[in-house]
Amino acid sequence: MGELVVGRPVLKQLFAVSAPLVLTSAISLTFRASVENGGDPRPGFDPWLMDARRSLDAGMQHDLDLLLGFSGRLLYYIEELLFSFDALEPDRIDAGYDEYLDHLQSLPPEAYQRMASNALMRVYRDRGVVETPPESDDPGEWRMFLRPGITRANLDEAASLVTSPAHLRERTIALIDGFWRQTYRSEYERQISELQRAVRHAQDLAHPVVQIAFAELTGHRLPDEVIGALGDIERVTYCPSSHLGQFVQFILYSPELILFFNPQTVLGQSARSRTRVSPIAADAIDSGDALGGLKALADPTRMRIVQMLREREQYAQEIVGKLGISQSAVSRHLGTLESAGIVTVRPVQGMKYYALDRAFLRSLGGYIDNIAEVVASE
């Protein structure tokens, strides 16, 4: 008998969209979309991000580079702002921008210095080092502390700002509010319906295995650094981000993980599934098709598979594990159901996903119902 271990809760998954979440994604992407080589756009970035950055006045662009450029390549400071709001809690998961701004304005200056310190301590932890912030406001000590996190900010200016918490608070709020009002608010209002629709469709692609769910939503593999941290994660939140393109964006804030996805990828999948032509139209089923379907269903194992697929599609190995029989036997049963038109198969990255062909099943039910009606009329 194995050793007793403390049980761990099942990983929770959440699908959400809110102004604080997508604003954090958008401002981070805009920071990363800086121009190179005298103004040439960085390859792969959505043109909207380039335009958004250029639309900011010079002072705002400077503060964007300063405030997002002192906390490492993962931009930890902007994450600290988001999580100070408890953005994933039930009473705030649908929060608007004004609620977020009110929260930021309610925080004292010391909270901003503390968030900056937390961001830098995370940078050190990524390096395998435990470091604590200076106990004094000596800019020299803070320069040493900030140095590993500098990506685009001026080190001296960053140290001067962090040692003046009131100014750090003022410029942080001004950057967030300025970015929202100058650039992002109109885009958010234009996109919010699509983002909400993407969340609804993304829920249909949910899968208990995070790596598979992420691949379904994005077409990409989950980054290795995220996979390695899953053991410490208790909840995964999936959020659409309009201008993500083909990039992968995530926030790893243990025990929380936020995975962003391109809404167009999800909505494109939904459109393709709606236009997929069923092998047999609802009004075209004949006795031969009906007999084939009924024969396929006349087996207890195949009926179990159909019951398993009622809520969502599943990949072949998952079905094997649930049935507890050999893979070859499951493959034969799935082949029979597919040949009869009861299930459809969708290959993804070397795996086969099976789903019910609901149109065929409705046709089959209608065919039987028509027989009953004829008998009744006689």
Image (tube, helix red, strand yellow):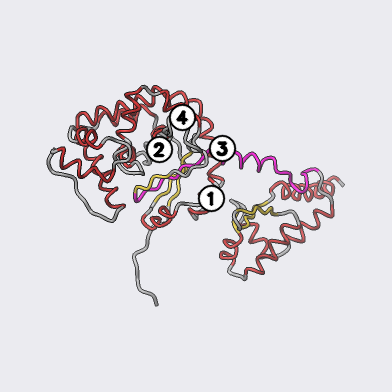
**Per the image, is 275 magenta?**
yes
Q: Which residue is mark 3?
A: 264
Mark-to-mark CA distance, 1 and 2: 24 Å
Q: Earlier in the sequence, mark 1 or mark 4?
A: 4
Callout 3 environment at 10 Å: few (<14), some (14 to 19), or many (20+)?
many
Above or below for 152 versus 259: above
Circle count: 4
Q: Is 337 part of what is drawn in magenta?
A: no
User: Residue 363: x, y in percent?
Assistant: 76, 47
Q: Is residue 205 left or right of residue 63?
A: right
Residue under numbered circle 4: 50
Q: Residue at x 48, y 32 (%)?
A: 41
The stretch in magenta equals 254-283
Three-letter amino acid code of the residue under disc 2:
Ile
Residue sticking out furthest to the front: 37
User: Going from the N terminus, do you reach mark 2 or mark 4 first?
Assistant: 4
* Label of residue 215 in the image: 1
Q: Residues within 10 Å of mark 4 (few under 14, many from 20)?
A: some
Q: Where the N terminus falls, by quadrant?
A: bottom left
Residue 303 horizontal side relative to residue 267, left or right:
right
**Under tag 3, what secondary structure?**
helix
Q: Residues within 10 Å of mark 1 (few under 14, many from 20)?
A: some
Determine the residue positioned at 21% across, 32% down. 161
Coordinates of residue 371 in the picture (x, y in percent): 82, 50
Disc nearer the start of the sequence (1/3): 1
Task: Give the alpha-carbon distance from disc 1 to disc 4, as whole Å.
Answer: 27 Å
Residue behind mark 2: 93
Q: Give the number of the mark in front: 1 or 2.
A: 1
Choose between 129 and 370: the one closer to the eye.
129
